[in-house]
Image (cartoon, grey):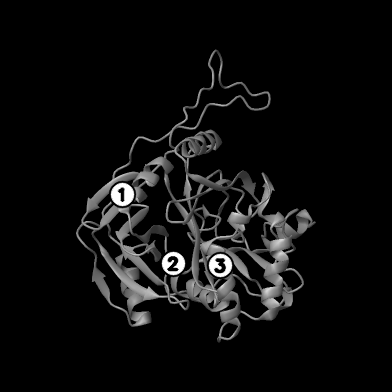
């Protein structure tokens, strides 16, 4: 456990669940002179073979359809802004994330630094974009000037009598069992065989900064194997992580997370999803890194998606925390992480991961036998 004096001196968020911060020579968690600093994550894109089934799940999960075109469905939350998710007709796969630039000048700066072009977006989205590819081969888009969807009526948090505080008198709590209205896209988690290289790419090109590093137990000398990364908005607080990255035997989407009003919205929305026959992967609980109350679900195509509420918000002053990666360290309270969530339940996903573990050992990347042993130790923890 760390002392309050250490936190005050170095500006870390070290506590019961985190080490004393970085050691001399370890990754600082930010680039000294990034090309730009993105404001937020804008949307994610997925290819799916059955858009009608995908849209049905999306409505049960709490999205609203913003627009439909041949081979495309745009899904949104209640917050004003861009759609959260764009679904495209095609073979099942994750197509990549889009980030929001601070302004159009940042697109020019990013294009000049990378040799990319600034291109107009389709009229249904508006604005302009720079399209890049990260070191894992994933398409990454940065946009500015896109159309702003108007705010929709939002699900309101319940008025709570907490402790001895009385805010509700002569009233009852009857949260309906209905979809938890998604407010916004919070973050995406990606796995890469080139984790360190990819991490540095996002910090340099998009100006993201690390909130927390995790490392395989006994392997801290080799550096981190997961990072929770936030936008650098200066003194304005940002989500604990907008992007999380982890080292693994193949490049893949892990999950994405969408904010809802409060615990009751999350829990009642989960009951609605169960009533509709959908699969809960893991939940309900509260995370350690990020502190979110969480609930994870599998959509009809096997993608993992999360409802969350009450996440941490950090400004630019906090330095990264460091902690060992363990399965038991994924939550402060809640049920144990399931085999499905950990990706070790029998099925298509775990089979693909197992095949990739062997294949990746023969290729030029950051995956090796020591890292494989570290990951197996995490699964057993």
Q: Could one spot residue 343 in this view of the protein?
A: yes
Give coordinates of residue 103: x percent, y percent: 33, 63
Q: CA distance from mark 1 to mark 2?
A: 37 Å
* Local SS, label 3: helix
Give coordinates of residue 146: x percent, y percent: 27, 58
Q: CA distance from mark 2 to mark 3?
A: 38 Å
Using the image, determine if residue 307 lies above or below residue 28: above
Find residue 351 and name its label.
Answer: 3
Give coordinates of residue 59: x percent, y percent: 37, 42
* Local SS, label 2: loop
Using the image, determine if residue 117 lies above or below residue 325: below
Q: How many marks?
A: 3
Classed neighbour count for the residue bearing mark 2: other residues with Cα under 10 Å, few (<14), some (14–19), many (≥20): many
Residue at position x 28%, y 77% from top? Answer: 117
Give coordinates of residue 246: x percent, y percent: 58, 68
Q: Quadrant of residue 20?
A: bottom right
Q: Earlier in the sequence, mark 3 or mark 1?
A: 1
Q: Which residue is mark 2?
A: 37
Q: Which residue is mark 1?
A: 52
Of marks 1 and 2, the one in the foreground: 1
Residue at position x 49%, y 61% from top? Answer: 231
Closer to the camera in the image, 349 or 46: 349
Residue at position x 56%, y 55% from top? Answer: 240
């Amino acid at each position: 456990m760390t002392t309050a004096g250490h936190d005050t001196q170095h500006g870390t968020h070290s506590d019961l669940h985190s080490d004393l911060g970085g050691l001399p020579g370890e990754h600082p968690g930010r680039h000294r002179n990034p090309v730009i600093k993105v404001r937020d994550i804008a949307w994610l894109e997925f290819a799916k073979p059955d858009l009608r089934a995908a849209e049905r799940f999306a409505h049960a999960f709490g999205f609203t359809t913003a627009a439909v075109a041949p081979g495309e469905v745009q899904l949104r939350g209640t917050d004003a802004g861009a759609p959260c998710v764009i679904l495209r007709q095609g073979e099942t796969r994750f197509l990549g994330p889009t980030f929001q630039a601070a302004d159009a000048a940042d697109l020019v700066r990013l294009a000049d630094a990378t040799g990319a072009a600034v291109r107009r977006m389709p009229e249904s989205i508006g604005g302009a974009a720079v399209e890049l590819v990260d070191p894992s081969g994933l398409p990454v888009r940065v946009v500015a000037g896109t159309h702003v969807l108007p705010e929709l009526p939002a699900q309101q948090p319940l008025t709570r009598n907490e402790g001895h505080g009385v805010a509700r008198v002569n009233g009852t709590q009857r949260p309906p069992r209905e979809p938890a209205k998604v407010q916004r896209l919070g973050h995406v988690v990606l796995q890469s065989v080139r984790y360190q290289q990819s991490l540095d790419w996002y910090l340099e090109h998009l100006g993201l900064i690390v909130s927390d590093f995790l490392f395989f137990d006994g392997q801290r000398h080799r550096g981190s194997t997961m990072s929770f990364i936030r936008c650098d908005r200066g003194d304005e607080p940002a989500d604990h992580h907008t992007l999380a990255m982890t080292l693994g035997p193949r490049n893949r989407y892990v999950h994405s997370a969408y904010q809802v009003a409060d615990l009751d919205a999350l829990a009642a929305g989960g009951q609605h999803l169960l009533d509709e026959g959908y699969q809960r992967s893991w939940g309900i609980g509260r995370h350690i890194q990020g502190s979110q109350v969480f609930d994870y679900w599998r959509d009809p195509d096997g993608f993992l998606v999360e409802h969350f509420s009450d996440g941490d918000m950090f400004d630019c002053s906090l330095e990264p925390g460091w902690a060992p990666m363990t399965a038991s360290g994924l939550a402060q309270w809640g049920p144990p992480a399931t085999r499905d969530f950990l990706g070790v339940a029998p099925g298509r996903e775990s089979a693909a991961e197992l095949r990739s573990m062997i294949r990746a050992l023969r290729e030029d990347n950051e995956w090796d036998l020591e890292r494989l042993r570290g990951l197996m130790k995490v699964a057993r923890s």
